Each structure stands twice: as structure tokens, then as C-alpha cells.
Image (cartoon, rainbow, N blue to C red):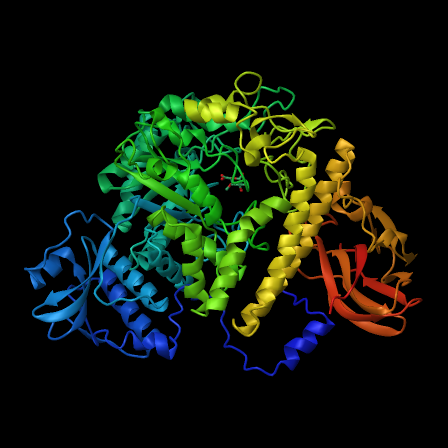
Amino acid sequence: MLRRLHIGILGVLLLGGWGLEPLHADTGQDAWLRYASLEAAARAQYESLPANLVVLEDSPLLNSAQGEMIRGVKGMTGKTLLAGKSVQERAIVLGTLAAIHAAAPGLALPSALEADGFWLVTAQVRGFDCLIVTSPRERGVLYGVFALLSKVARGDNVAGLNEVRQPSAALRWVDQWDNLNGSIERGYAGPSIFFEKGSVRADLTRAGEYARLLASIGINGCTINNVNADPRILDDGFLPQLARVADVFRVWGVQLAVSVDLSSPKVLGNLDSFDPLDPRVIEWWRTKVEKIYRQIPDFGGFVVKADSEGRSGPSSYGRTPADAANVIARALKPHGGVLFYRAFVYDHHLDWRNLKNDRARAAYDIFHPLDGKFDDNVIIQIKYGPIDFQAREPVSPLLGGLEKTNEGVELQITQEYTGQQRHLCFLPTMWNGILDFDLRVNGHTTPVKDLVAGKVFHRPSGALVGVANVGMDANWLGHPLAMANLYGFGRLAWNPNLSSEMIAEEWTGLTFGTDRVVVKTVTAMLLASWRTYENYTGPLGAQTLTDITGSHYGPGIESSERNGWGQWHRADHEGIGMDRTVATGTSFAGQYPPAIRDLYDSIQTTPDELLLFFQHVPYTFRLHSGKTVIQYIYDSHYEGAEQAADFVRQWKSLEHRVPDELYADVLVRLEYQAGHAIVWRDAICNWFLRTSGIPDAKGRVGNHPDRIEAEEMHLKGYSVMDVTPWENASGGKGIECVKTSACTASFRFERAAGIYEMNVQYFDQNNGESKFRIFVGDRHVDEWIANDHFPATRPGGDSSTRRRISGLALRPGDEIRIEGIPDGAEHAPLDYVELRASTK
Ligand code: GCV
């Protein structure tokens, strides 16, 4: 999390000097359910809403629906609805179809409404004009209430409503990767809301609030623990704790599920085997599941990660994933539970020297031959791409490779490879492309959204699963704008036909209110952000060129190469890309239905954005755009960094239009992102320049006239260090203060007198809190403590960050001095200083 406010001298003056009323504090806890008071004009149109609320049945879920309706209307209009049990006058009426039918027998109900779907309609009940929210099930009524409130919050007309909404897929789940000790794998927003020190938290308030948020976007299941599952989750003693979570979920219609480890019968059950076909193992699963349902009657089911990244699996006994999945699914079946078996199964010890090896092939190679062998309550959970949540991947061919098996797509809300919630990256834009992608199975129109809804092959189940990883941070995901991804996932899981534009606008309106300038600006930023992130990180489908074996955060271009993990881009001095064609490559392209295979198999037809995923080409290869690959790499990285800088400018236009704390919080993050985009840009451009030997036609790469390298300054106490990999520091080097308690680095300013912006590029590790002080001559102009939390214990691309000092008056001959005071293992490391004449 970024917790320091980078507000330079001018920034401080501006913030303090505007004299406008600060907008009220907003921690982000209520997310898109703020129910903020509507402006007078917007409120006027809801004057005619009935003053009464009738809930026809009594149940915990309908109580939630009732409470939500009252809370929402009160917050937005100031009116308190009068609750009742029967219609005596005009009312908002909530009830299942059966109850509505009993209350208004003459009303023709929509026949096609299923399960979680709902109907919002204005109709007469007992002779009174009512606004009815109904569904076959109570959960659908709750969804209807949220939909109605969302309309009001966004100023939609609710007079004369007649709207049926039906979810596309039956199962719309989120997975949390929470560990029992309270940490979260790939979580970027504080500790778990479910677990603490090996147990379920005593206080589950946040878990309940999370369930409410999930319900508001139609999510009906949540797996609360890491797919790298701790077997103790199934310990008999743990089940009552799980039941407590189920209790806080139930009132919001969210079913509890857990990830399980396949070796549990052995590790936990003291058997000498976990062979899925061993009768004792079968019995163990049966008994365990029975015990769960005795305590949690509406338990959702299990998620299994097996034979993957070191997890135990059926291969230990020569069994297939179908053998393993069915045994557990049969235990769940009598209780109505489902089993998600993840297709993320691959060998991470591949021989990288063998050019035919390809991790991308694994899911299809393993699961396609098993099509039809899985029981009906098994869903194969397939990551959207064949690798692993990269910023750009083709759609997994397995999504088109199962006709007699249920399947679900797994999307990643937590931004593991897309900036870890320090960078703005709105993912529904990418998800639209995935869900709309037509795999042409059997030569027909078969978009992913229909395949995963089970519509194409008339499967009993279909699913969209999002890995969410919210944490205890008040605003759930760390970056205030990251919640657009959770919201967007839920909306797309319900209706995959929604466009990212619609989602962005909806979310912005709900989160920030209806100020058109705010909605327009934030929506534009969100919509540009995924492509921007891709631009300054990984080009042309080469995948995110990040530190694959470590943090998955900053640049780490060669980390993917010469190891068994198989995320290779195979860049050398001549060219780049994985040859995955049928004729000369790994044949991965051949896993797609013919029309798509042909598209990706030919270098002429492979879309530019995926070129390097499918083809190995020389740097001089010309894209469809006419640009060479190498020039595209340079240009896209410069464009990306420029776009990231533009987010700062766009956000600044919203000062005093969004709450002050939120404004400042987002600004800090966007400024950091703009700086980190430069770190990415330079690392990648410099690496490709050195590797290819081909200069940037625009002369930018390697030329930084405004930069003063720290290693070239006058050093007192500081020593020069090599940074590895070299491309993650300007010039491959930085300076560190190792031997003394304080060091200085100084240089003379020799440019024209004027007002300058100075960026100090330094490294902020998480194993110390160094202090920096800046002087111009005797003038103390700034100081700060390097106490951000980046995933780094040494200087490099993960820890590289910048401090901006604006409005700095400089004259030729001035001495600029940086004083570094090390702390712990962080040696006040510095990379460079950049001075730009201020445009103001
Ligand atoms: C939970 C990637 C992530 C792992 C994750 C794994 C998975 O490899 O880096 O943290 O494990 O995917 O999806 O199982």
C-alpha cells in the first residue's frame, strides 16, 4: 500500500490555499453501496415512490432485502419507508413469485423467470399501484432490491417499470486465496477478513459486509481459502468455525465453499493413501462431506487445485483428474454441492531447451481427452488464458474443448500481474474481449460467454469465477479505483453482454455520484487503463515481462527464460516470440477449432496484439500496422508511460469534485504509477536496445538529457552499486549508503535559472525506512521517509520509485545535495535525479 502523500511544495500550497469546503471523508468501505443523498433535482423524481414497504414473507434473506431497501431509500431520499406485511395502500412490495401470486392472483407472472432472476414491475396489488420486486427465489428478490436501488442511485427513471433480469450463468462465484494464518496469496489490501492466526476470525463483521457487496452484484458463492489449500480447513474442529462464516453469508444469499487439498484423507484422516479410488478414501470424503452439511446445510462445495505447482494430486496414484473429481463430487451430490476442479494443471519443470515444449498446451492436453468423464456436479474451472492471468493472452482453447463437461472461466480481479492495485488497471475491458471471443466450435458461433454459461452444449451448469482477494483495508482492495474490477466482475458474471463502458459508467456513478464531469473523467481513465498498462509492460502478446519467479510486479525480462516454469518469450539478439504454430512450433495453435487455429497458425493473420504469443519473429518483422516489432516495443512503452502521466492530469481536474481524502489517496497512487511506468518503460526499452542492437528511430531510448545519474554525483559516504538485473536501474547502477549513518550525493546545477520540477528516483525496500533530505545550497527543500510497502528487499524494479519536488527555484551554480540516512537493510539507495523546467 502507498501511504505517503507525495505532495510537493506547490501541491501543498495549492491544497491549502483553495479555500473550498472539503467534501466529506469516505473510507471506501461502502464501495458502490454508498446510498449518498441525491441532489434535489434527482430526488424530486423519486417523490412519487410509495412510502410503504411490504415484505410478503418472513425469512433472513427477505429481512436483508427489507433492511437494504429501507437503508437505501433513507440514504438517498431521506425518507424512511414504513414496513408492513400486507398491502393496504400504495407500496413497494417484495416477495417470491408464489407470494406475489397469492397477493395479486390476477397478475400474469413472467413464465421464463428462473432461479436467481427477478422482475421489477409496476402493477396493481389489491387495487393499489405498487412497485413489485419478485423472483422465483428469495435470493432473486434481494438481487431485485439491489438493482432497484442502483437505478435510484444513478438517477434512472423507475416509473412504470417492467423489467425482467436473468443471470447468464447459474454459478457466479468469487475465490479468495486466504491462508489460515491471515495472509492472502496475491492479496494487496491487508490481511484476511476471514482468518487470523490459524482460526476463523472472532469478529466476522467484514465478512458479512463483503457478502452484502457480493450479493449486490449477483455473486452467489464464495470460496474463502487459498486454492493452495491447508488440509486443516477440513478438520472436524474447524467445521463449526466455517459454519460461522456461512451464517454471515447466508443472509445475503452467498453460499460458502472451501478449497480442499486432495491429500486430506491421508494428512488429516490418517489413512496411508489418498488414492481417489481407494474405498477408504471414498468413504473418508463421504463422511467428511456429510459432517459439513450437518453444520452448513446450504454449503456450496469445494474447489480443487491438484497436480499443479507442487500440490498433491491423482497422478501420484496413476489416476486422472476425473477419477479424483468424481469421488469428491459424488460425496457432495446428495447435498446439492458442486465441485470446481481447476484446469490449471501443468508441469513447472519443463525443459526450456526443447523448443517443442509448451506450458500453454497443458490444460487442453490433460482435460480434453477426459471430456464426458466428469460427473454432472463437477465444473472444470479454466483460467481465461492458457498461461496465467497475463495482461494479454489468447483465450484458452480448453474453453472450446469440452462439450460433455461443465466448464467455468476463471478471471482474476486481484491484479497479480496487472499492477497489484498500485497501478490503475480496469480489467472488464480485457474481460469483454475474452467473453466475446468466438471460438467457432464445430464451425458455429460459440462465444466464450455462451460456452461458460453452459448454453452451447446444454450443460446443467456453467460458471464465472473471479479471484478477488479483498482484505481488511477499509476500501477492500487497496486502490480506491480497483473496486471497479470487483464490481465489473459481478456485473459481467450476471450479464456478459454488458460493455466495459457501461460498467465503468455505472460504477463511477454509484461510487462518486452523478457529477457528469467526474463520471466522464473517471470512466475515460478506467477504459484507457488496461491498454495503458499493457503498453508500458509487455508488448504484442509476449506476456507481461515481469519478474516471473518472484514478485510478479516490476520488470524482470529474463526471469521467465532458462527455467522450467514455461512462461518463455524466447527473446534473443535476433528476435522474440514463441513459435506455437503447427508446422514449425509447439502445435499449441492446433488445439483451437479450425477457424481459430488457422488464424493463429499463420504469421499473416495472427493479430498484432498476440503476434509474439504465437510466432517467433525477427525484430525487423513488420506488423500489420507497418511498424517493425522493435519500433513498436519502443513506441508502445513511451506511449504507455505518457498515458500513465496523463491519468495524473485527468485526476487533478477532479480536485474538489471528489472527497478530499480520496482525491489525495488516488493522486498519490497515480503519481507513483506514472513514475513506475517510466521504470518499466526504461527497463524494457533499454533491454531490447542492448539485446537487438537496433536503435530507437525516434532517438529516445538510452537518451535522458534531464537525468543526473546518482553514480555520477559527488559522493560522500555513498558507494556505487550494480543493480541486478541491470535494466532495472538507470545506467544499471545506483548508490547505497552502507558504511556510515548518513551519506550525501551532490551535484551542481548548471542550467538556466528558473522554476524546475525535480524527480528523485530512489529505491524503497520493505526491510528498512531510510530518510532522505534535499538541500539547494543551504536551503532545505524537502524530506521524506521511504516507508512504502513494495514487494522488495533490495534495489530494483520492484522498489524503484520517485519523489517529486515541484516549484523548485534554481540558479546556475546552485549545489543540489541529497542526504540519505539508511535504516535496517535499506541503505538509502538512489538511482538518479531528473530536472525539468516547470511548465507553470
Ligand atoms: C494460488 C499463479 C499464482 C499463484 C496461484 C496460482 C494458481 O501461479 O502466482 O499464487 O496460487 O497461479 O492460480 O493456482
Name the spot of residue 738 as percent of width and height, x first: 84, 54
Residue sitting at 27 percent across and 46 percent down?
Answer: 293
Residue 423 lies in what quarter of the image? bottom right
Position of the N terminus by quadrant: bottom right
Reply above or below: 97 against 160: above
In percent of width and height, residue 190 lies at: 53, 58
Picture coordinates of residue 724, whole percent (x, y): 76, 42
Task: Point out the residue furthest to the left here.
Answer: 106
Task: Identify which residue is drawn at 27% across, 64% down.
Answer: 64
Q: Where is residue 302, by image quadrant?
A: top left
Question: Most extreme residue toward the front, as rendered?
Answer: 626
392 sits to left or right of 58 = right
**Is residue 606 among the parts visible in the rendering?**
yes
* Count of numbered circles on the image: 0
Query: In the image as oriented, which residue stretches furthest toward the top?
Result: 583
Give the quadrant of the C terminus.
bottom right
Of residues 440 and 818, the one drawn nearer to the viewer in this rendering: 440
Q: Is residue 277 visible?
A: no
Q: Is residue 470 above or below residue 280?
A: below
Q: Is residue 508 left or right of residue 6?
A: left
State the image quarter where residue 504 is shown.
bottom left
What residue is shown at x 28% (from left), y 50% (from top)? Answer: 296
Task: Report the front residue among 647 and 545.
Answer: 647
Q: Is residue 419 above or below residue 771?
A: above
The image position of residue 156, as x and y in percent, is 32, 66
Foreground: 565 or 702? 702
- Residue 636 in the figure: left or right of residue 460: right
